[in-house]
Amino acid sequence: MAELARIEKFTPTDLETLRNELMRAKVDSWQAADVVSAFLMGRGYGVNASAMRNAVPHLTVQPGSYEVMQAVLEAVAFVM
């Protein structure tokens, strides 16, 4: 049975930068999904766009919770 590819563990600095960009931009979930998609695609990952729009609110809550952000990104990204 083939093993599923996993996305990398992003650094707290990368996740903090992403969160700050989302908070500073004050965009709706569609636009925020584009920001997160660009973050992931810039690192070589594909993105499930509809799941990304639903997941965006979880990326901006609970400041300092990088584990939650990592889990959300793992749920919507896939290795290309």
Image (cartoon, rainbow, N blue to C red):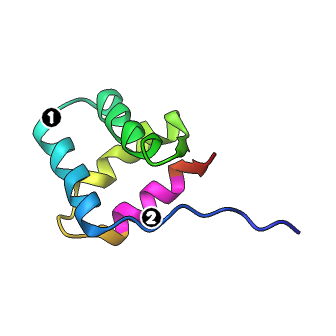
- Write the residue at 30% across / 28% down: 31
Name the mark on residue 4.
Answer: none
Q: Is residue 32 above or below residue 4?
A: above
- Write the residue at 54% across / 61% down: 7
Q: Spot the residue most to the right.
A: 1
- Residue 11 vs residue 42: left or right? left
Magenta segment: does it hold 70? yes
Span shown in magenta: 68-75
Which residue position is annotated with label 2?
71
Name the mark on residue 25.
Answer: 1
User: What is the magenta segment's predominant secondary structure?
Assistant: helix
Question: What is the distance, in whole Å, between disc 1 and disc 2 at their CAs?
Answer: 22 Å
Which is more toward the observer, 70 or 14? 14
Which is more toward the observer, 36 or 41? 41
- Write the residue at 36% across / 71% down: 67
Q: How many marks?
A: 2
Label 2 Cα neighbours within 10 Å, binned few <14 / some 14-19 / many ≥20: few
Residue 28 lies in quadrant: top left
- Residue 30 vs residue 21: left or right? right
Q: What amino acid is found at the position of numbered circle 2 in the picture?
A: Ala
The reply to whether the C-beta atoms of the residues labelled 1 and 2 are less than 8 Å apart is no
Q: Mark 1 or mark 2: which comes first in sequence?
A: 1
x then y, percent, for residue 29? 31, 33
